[in-house]
Image: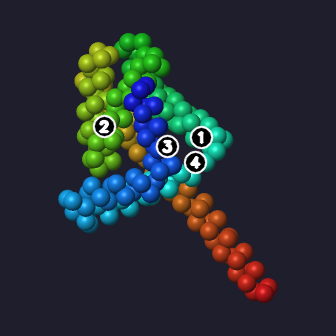
Amino acid sequence: MIGMGGAILFLYLTIKFKERFYGIIIKLLSKISHKLAHKIANIFGMLTEGFGSLKGVKNYLITFALSILIIVLYATTAYIGFFTVGMQNIKPVTFEMGWVLMSISAVGIVIPTPGGTGSYHTLAKSALVLLFGFDEVISLSYAFLTHLINYFSFIIVGIISFLILNKQHENLLKLVDVEVDEL
């Protein structure tokens, strides 16, 4: 909790004093490499610009509420995953188990492997076996199936989003063409 508060305070200060932090980053890292210093400073600038767009209490509240919603949905999908492979027939499953499993297996997605392959499966299987006492075979089945469903869900939602955004872009271009022709 203290770490989270510290991180929020650090983000606030970096946004408020962006130029000072930018100068400090360049000054410190340029001793190592000018190229690295400018690359890191550019990333820092983009991050602070992105976080700086969250101006106003309303935007903070919306971001906080949507973050909670995303976390609850991830935990719910982990919980539903128990039922997809019939783990409830082996021993009782709870939403809390899904929450813990989601928290642990999320680290496997963060580890830089292609699509979380391998690292997610290892952590999910290990948590199911070591924490909840399930067999390795059913635990690996859970990990494989939930990863597969989530992966293809993201691909399908991505394609649908692309098509919708592409259609909106085409409509906007048509609207601009009509307005230009009227001039």
Please give the name of the residue rendered at 33% of the width and 47% of the height, measured from the top-left corner.
115
Q: Check the image and name the residue furthest to the right.
A: 182
Residue 164 falls in image quadrant = bottom right
User: Counting residues from the N terminus, which is met first, the one under dot 3 or under dot 1?
Assistant: 3
Q: Which mark is residue 108?
A: 2
Q: Is residue 171 visible?
A: yes
User: Counting residues from the N terminus, which is met first, the one under dot 2 or under dot 1?
Assistant: 1
Q: Position of residue 168 (x, y in %)?
A: 64, 65
Residue 148 falls in image quadrant = top left
Quick check: 167 left or right of 139? right
The amino acid beneath tag 3 is Tyr
Given residues 138 and 76, the one toward you in this image is: 76
Please give the name of the residue rendered at 42% of the width and 54% of the height, measured from the top-left corner.
20
Structural crowding at the residue carrying mark 1, measured as other residues with C-alpha within 10 Å and reported as few (<14), some (14–19) or many (≥20): few
Q: Which is closer to the viewer, label 2 or label 3?
A: 3
The kind of secondary structure element at disc 1 is helix
- Residue at mark 1: 60
Are discs 3 and 4 less than 8 Å apart at CB? no
Q: Position of residue 32 (x, y in %)?
A: 20, 59
The kind of secondary structure element at disc 2 is helix
Q: Is residue 141 visible?
A: no
Q: Which mark is residue 12?
A: 3
User: Counting residues from the N terminus, which is met first, the one under dot 1 or under dot 4?
Assistant: 4
Q: Give the Cα distance between marks 3 and 4.
A: 11 Å
Q: Give the Cα distance between marks 3 and 1.
A: 12 Å
Q: Which mark is residue 29?
A: none
Q: Which mark is residue 54?
A: 4
The amino acid beneath tag 4 is Leu
Q: Give the Cα distance between marks 2 and 1.
A: 28 Å
User: Counting residues from the N terminus, which is met first, the one under dot 4 or under dot 2?
Assistant: 4
Q: Is residue 182 above or below residue 33?
A: below
